[in-house]
Structures are given as C-alpha cells and as structure tokens.
Image (cartoon, grey):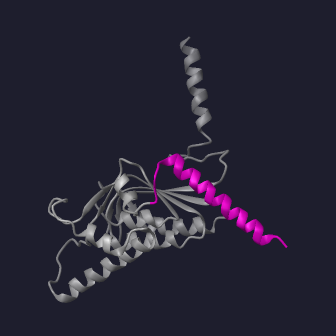
Amino acid sequence: MEHDKDTTAVTEEQKLEPYVNDDGITAPMNAKHNIHCLTVIGQIEGHYILPPQNKTTKYEHIIPALVAIEEENDIEGLLIILNTVGGDVEAGLAIAELIAGMSKPTVSIVVGGGHSIGVPLAVSAKRSFIVPSATMTIHPVRMNGMLVGIPQTLSYFDRMQERIIGFVTSHSEMTPARFRELMLVKDELVMDVGSVLDGEAAVREGLIGSLGGLSEGISTLYELIDERNANASHDNQP
C-alpha cells in the first residue's frame, strides 16, 4: 500500500512540472488567453540599493520587463498584483507611467497593501481591483537622510507631490481636492499625517475601480482582451 502512495505522489508532482519552472513561476498550458503576471511586492527599490534583508521590487528589472511585455506578440494582457509598502517615489512613478502607457490590456489587484507610491501603481492599470482586507495609505511625500532646510527644498517636495496627485487623480475617479484632504488628515497615522483606506473605502472614494480578487481580475482582463481583439478584427476588415 505504501508503494502505491509513493507512486501517486510522484505522478501528481509530474503533473505540475509543465506549470511551474525553477523560479516558481506558473505557466498555464490551456488558458483562454496568454497573460503575464507581474508582482510588485515589498519595497520599491530606486536609485539606492536597500539592505539584503529587505524584500524589494527593483525598478531596473521591472522597466525592461514592461518593455518586453509590450513588444511580445504572444502576451495578450498584463495582470499586476500589488502588495507593497511603497518605496522610492521617482522609481514607483516611472513604473506607473510605463504601465499607464501600455497599449495592451492591464488589470491591477491590490492584496495586502498598496501603500504610498503603491497608490499610483494600483491606478495605473486600465482596470483596478482591491480585496476587502487590503489597505492603502495616502500621505505626503517624505524623504530620508539629511535635507537642506531652504525654500527650494520645500518647493521640490511640493512639485513632486503635485506630480503624484496629478497622476493618481487622472487615472482614478478621485478628485485632487479629496486626495489632498486625505493626504493631510491628522491623528490617523502614528508620527505622520495621512489616511489609511481599506478595500471598501478605496472603492467608495473612487481611488480603486472595484472590489474583487483574482477571479474578478482575470475575468476582466479576458474581457478587455476579447474587446481589443474584436476591435482589431473590425479594423482589419476590407
């Protein structure tokens, strides 16, 4: 009997071999559409290397990956899954701008957290989802390290903040006035100003499109792909 169990275990493992490579990345063999899953996790690493114990998403890896996804004819859509605490402002905003500029269908899902510069990343996709238990933190731009206490420094912060507000509000239903209001709320964050929105609040405020998880995100991405393919077929008709 033990020999039969071992044989069954090996058989099940062999069944999974075509779906998982050495990096643990799944590769579906019979999906309706060929989509790519991009994960943004941990802290977004920018121009400075973070300590090795930090879980990071490196922007120098993500940017060429996005270019390759846009160019690859076999990839029909992009699913972005976010669980990030934020990170480098300019790196996160650069990634968000590239996602927003893609011609292929894109869908984002916030699971766990989409904090700080993760907010622009979440709204950069053509459709956005958030699970009810996830949270998103909206707060003013912060910088670490020594800063020069002069008006030019404050002006730079203001301009950077306006870039983020402009991007988020142009890719969501939230107004700039409401975003600034949530950004400057007192007594909600420890030693800081800002707001924390759960999944329902993020949708209610117009920041995220819909409540939903993996199945809703993939179904919506398939719908966008079908719509794109139908439009392409119509354009190609004589």
* Residue with the most extreme top position: 1
Which residue sits at x=33%, y=69%?
88
The answer to which quarter of the image holds residue 11 is top right
Where's residue 56, x and y in %?
Answer: 36, 59
Judged by its main secondary structure, the magenta piece is helix
Q: Where is residue 37 in the image (x, y as percent from the top left)?
A: 53, 55
User: In this rendering, would 183 be left or right of 208?
Assistant: left
Task: Please say if 118 is above or below 145.
Answer: above
Residue furthest right as drawn = 238
Is 201 or 32 nearer to us in this picture? Answer: 201
User: Residue 18: in sight, yes or no?
Assistant: yes
Q: In the image, is residue 80 part of the stretch drawn in magenta?
A: no
Task: Say which residue appears at 21% left-offset and 83% top-offset.
Answer: 154
Which of the image's four quarters has the C terminus?
bottom right
Vertical side of 6 occupied by 42: above or below:
below
* Number of disc labels: 0
> What's drawn in magenta, residue-wise?
209-238
Front in this rendered view, residue 164 or 86: 164
Image location of residue 157, percent across then percent down: 26, 80
Q: Can residue 76 be seen in this view?
A: no
Side (left or right) of 138 relative to 111: left
Nearer the observer, 175 or 89: 175
Say which quadrant the N terminus sits in: top right
Which residue is at 58% across, 29% downward?
Answer: 12
185 left or right, relative to 128:
left
Q: Which of 121 and 178 is in front in this view?
A: 178
